[in-house]
Image: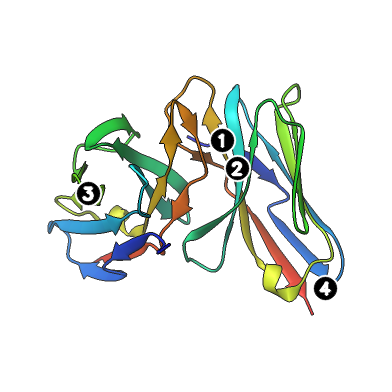
Amino acid sequence: KAGVTQTPRYLIKTRGQQVTLSCSPISGHRSVSWYQQTPGQGLQFLFEYFSETQRNKGNFPGRFSGRQFSNSRSEMNVSTLELGDSALYLCASSLTLRGISYEQYFGPGTRLTVT
Amino acid sequence: SQQGEEDPQALSIQEGENATMNCSYKTSINNLQWYRQNSGRGLVHLILIRSNEREKHSGRLRVTLDTSKKSSSLLITASRAADTASYFCATEDYGGSQGNLIFGKGTKLSVKP
């Protein structure tokens, strides 16, 4: 099975711009989660989608949004970028069956640099 | 917010030695997972242990879970230079949100050849 893929791998943006990151989960996985990783805050949960619905959301401002398509692919968008948004953005997919969670499989991440 | 706290923050050992990392967490959990990350790349899943399990093995890895003490440990036996990485524990809260893992800050393991 192909793993989780994320595009682009690297991105440089300017303050005030917006950015869209893409994630393709492992085939058959309907749950997609997004995380932000920074040296200061570590790994923090952004949101999770299941069957095109956002089920859970972390403690991030409304500038961070996402969506999931019918094929389970997901995108996240950050509007009005700030310097502090520079981070590694990780996407993970997993099986969720009858309320039981399984391990999450992570993509390689998108390294976003905001200048 | 951080749930798991790994200890130690950094660990340096020689090849062939065992490495033990500990994780403490604050709330009741559904499961606890360990991940490895090489130098700013994606995370690799190592082991998932559910709240009703006490010990799990996978190859050279052994994970224990003590829910009464809210702690877990990861043991890597006969370490290799390729084990050099950061190791994170992550918890899914009991009755909490699926797909939402709360990570600790990690243990940076360095295995010297």
Mark 4 / mark 2, whichever is N-terminal: 4
Q: Are marks 1 and 3 on the same chain?
A: no
- Which residue is the site of mark 1? B91
Q: Chain of mark 3?
A: A
Q: Residues within 10 Å of mark 1 (few under 14, many from 20)?
A: many
The amino acid marked with disc number 4 is Glu
Residue at 22% in and 49% down: A71
Q: Which residue is mark 4?
A: B15
Chain letter of the residue carrying label 1:
B
Q: Residues within 10 Å of mark 3 (few under 14, many from 20)?
A: some
Residue in front for this viewpoint, B69 or A97: A97
How many residues crowd around disc 2 within 10 Å: few (fewer than 14), some, or many (20 or more)? many
Same chain for mark 4 and mark 1? The answer is yes
- Would you place residue B84 above or below residue B19 in this image? below
User: Which residue lies under the disc numbered 2?
Assistant: B33
Label 3 amino acid?
Asn
Return the residue at label 3: A71
Q: Given contact means CB atoms under 8 Å apart, are the residues at marks 1 and 2 in contact?
A: yes
C-alpha gap between disc 1 and disc 3: 28 Å
Q: CA distance from mark 4 to mark 3?
A: 45 Å
Give how far across and how far down residue B48 sits, in percent. 62, 42
Q: Residue B110's x, y, as percent?
A: 72, 68
Give me the chain letter of mark 4: B
Q: Are marks 2 and 3 on the same chain?
A: no
Report x, y in % for residue B112. 78, 76
Give the answer, above or below, for where A65 lies relative to A106.
Answer: above
Task: Please identify, in this view, whether the residue under mark 1 or under mark 3 is nearer the observer.
Answer: 3
Kindly report the distance in space between the C-alpha atoms of the residues bearing marks 4 and 2: 25 Å
